Image (cartoon, rainbow, N blue to C red):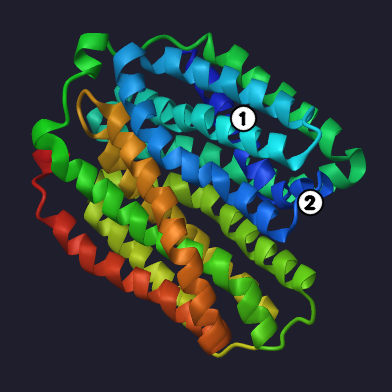
Amino acid sequence: MPSWRGYLAVVGLVGVIDTAFLLGIISGYAKKLGAGDAEAGFIAGLYSMVAIPASLLAGALVDAIGRRRSLSIGLAWDTASMILYGVVDDYRGLAMVRGLHAVGGSLVYPAYMAIVGDSSPRDRRGREAGRYLAVVALAVALGSLTSSIIVHELGFKPALRLIALIVFAGFIASLRIPETRPRREAMRGLGGQLSHVIHSAVTILLLYIGFGAIIGGMPQALLNQGLVGVEEEASAITGAIIGIASLASIPAFIIAGRLTDIRGPAATLALGGALVVISQLAILGSTSIYTMMAAAIPYGAAIAAVMTVSTFMAISVEGARGSSVAIQQIANIAGVAVGAPLGGVLAGMKAVTGVALAVASTGVLLLLYSNTLRSLASSEV
């Protein structure tokens, strides 16, 4: 294994930890800087609003100027953004930094996964995707589960400076990674490889519509079903469910990668869809928070299976992998944007059952879509 692979793993760990860290605290930080509820919500969502168009540019840039160069630029930009988060004095400045952060952050994941795709043998591409996605999942779990604790102990600004140092370490690590694709080859268009891009985007879109339904609907569902009494408790339980799912996904990514190489992406996707359905059937009509937390374990495995397949398809594009992964990233963000309000509506109508049915429906669609992948000739992937 090339010696620089270790540096790539470091980048995967710290390259998304800033985004995960901010998810749970950005609204509270905005309110501390004077924002009202509406402004705080807008600032929290501003990253996604900017990241969708920025990702299109980011993908083209990764292919045009090089994977490693783009990765280093993105990490340097993220480091600067985290420093700026810690020096702003009002919520208007925070909104500006939030938008700037999304521009740089949009570069990191496409560059990172394009490097994984470039350096993975065809017969081990699933394993490599699963391995490096497990690192990303660990970063998401660490960032989301520790953010409130660190902020409570240190305060907002010192905590943000700490994350800036961590991301800067990722920037230094990125400088030890070689360029993995000659620029003229990386610029090869998507052309006849559009089927890979479409399969990648559709699978991740369906997965994240369901995930968005949980984010946007579960707190309200818990309140409507009378399982908790206050909004803070509902948010804490939802965060715990997401954290458990993230932790469960880490070993599942390794398994899903091996399964994809051995049995093919269709089998892995079918398994992921089935696990989504099973996890949600377990909580239909449930009045136990512990059951919901237990159901997060198979749901985390489902996330791993589906995301591995989606990423496998994205990095199986020869040439313009940066653009392919960027399209996957856009579909990911769009899925949450669609699923979150849908989850809120269904939570208002049917509480936990409504959210569970929405998520289970995405599992059924993933199961059906796995038949589409079966039609791909093995030589195409």
Q: Which mark is residue 124?
A: none
* Within-10-Å neighbours for mark 1: few <14, some 14–19, many 20+: many
Q: Nearer the viewer, residue 7 or 202?
A: 202
How many numbered badges does the structure rendering display?
Answer: 2
Identify the image quadrant of the N terminus: top left
Which is more foreground, mark 2 or mark 1? 2
Measured from the top left, where is residue 175 in percent x and y? 53, 9
Q: CA distance from mark 2 to mark 1?
A: 27 Å
Image-quadrant location for residue 227: bottom right
Q: Residue at x 57, y 35 (%)?
A: 99
Considering the numbered disc 2 on the image, is that residue within a helix, a strand or a loop? helix
Q: Is residue 358 above or below residue 199?
A: below
Measured from the top left, where is residue 95 in percent x and y? 65, 39
Q: Which mark is residue 31?
A: 2
Measured from the top left, where is residue 365 in percent x and y? 28, 69
Measured from the top left, where is residue 208 in percent x and y? 43, 58
Q: Which mark is residue 14?
A: 1
Identify the image quadrant of the C terminus: top left
Q: Indicate the amino acid at tag 1.
A: Val
Q: Is residue 284 visible?
A: no
Q: Indicate the amino acid at tag 2.
A: Lys
Q: Residue at x 73, y 24 (%)?
A: 83
* Within-10-Å neighbours for mark 2: few <14, some 14–19, many 20+: some
Image-quadrant location for residue 112: top left
Q: Is residue 48 above or below residue 159?
A: below
Horizontal arrangement in the rendering, residue 301 relative to residue 264 (left or right): right
